[in-house]
Image (tube, rainbow, N blue to C red):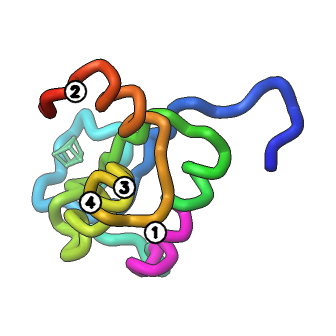
Amino acid sequence: MWTIACRPILAVWEITLACTLKCAHCGSRAGTRRVGELTTAECLDVVAQLARMGVREVALIGGEAFLRGDWIEIINAVRGPRNGLQHADGWSRSHRAENPKGG
Ligand code: SF4
């Protein structure tokens, strides 16, 4: 439990450095997957930690995030209980409140 007045509400998370391109302007210098990138289980643990911290929005970036075979699992975890997962994230709650018919 965070007890300080200042806590993160937004996380921008580079879930892989892998990319099929090598753009000259790339701020991440993406291309090759990092040695030791997080496993699926480790990513899901990070999602749970972000939720516990009260993070309301998570942006998944890369590299090319879709090159991770588990990207949909990570996204579903970030989206939270709508997909039957146990933790709740602020984004899902606030988004559902603003969009009660879905979307
Ligand atoms: S992550 Fe984006 S900017 Fe970087 S090399 Fe890949 S496509 Fe280009």
Q: Residue 83 carries which label?
A: 4
Q: Tell me which numbered mark, 1 or 4, is placed earlier along the sequence.
A: 1
* Disc 2, SS: loop
Q: Nearer the viewer, residue 100 or 15?
A: 100
Rounded to the nearest whole Å, what is the CA distance between mark 2 and mark 4? 16 Å
Image: magenta residue range: 38-46
Amino acid, disc 3: Pro
Rounded to the nearest whole Å, what is the CA distance between mark 1 and mark 4? 17 Å
What residue lies at 39% left-to-right and 78% top-to-bottom?
40
Q: Which mark is residue 5?
A: none
In the picture as drawn, the residue positioned furthest to the front comes out as 100
Q: Which of 70 and 90 is in front in this view?
A: 90
* Disc 4, SS: helix
Q: Is mark 4 within 8 Å of ligand 1?
A: no
For residue 41: magenta?
yes
Whether residues under marks 2 and 4 lie with C-beta atoms below 8 angstroms apart, the answer is no
For label 2, the residue is 100
Q: Quick check: 79 above or below 101?
A: below
Rounded to the nearest whole Å, what is the CA distance between mark 3 and mark 1? 17 Å
Q: Quick check: 80 above or below 103?
A: below
For label 3, the residue is 81
For label 1, the residue is 43
Q: In this view, does 82 lie to the left or right of 34?
A: left
Amino acid, disc 1: Cys
- The percent position of residue 35, horizontal first and vertical second, equals 44, 79
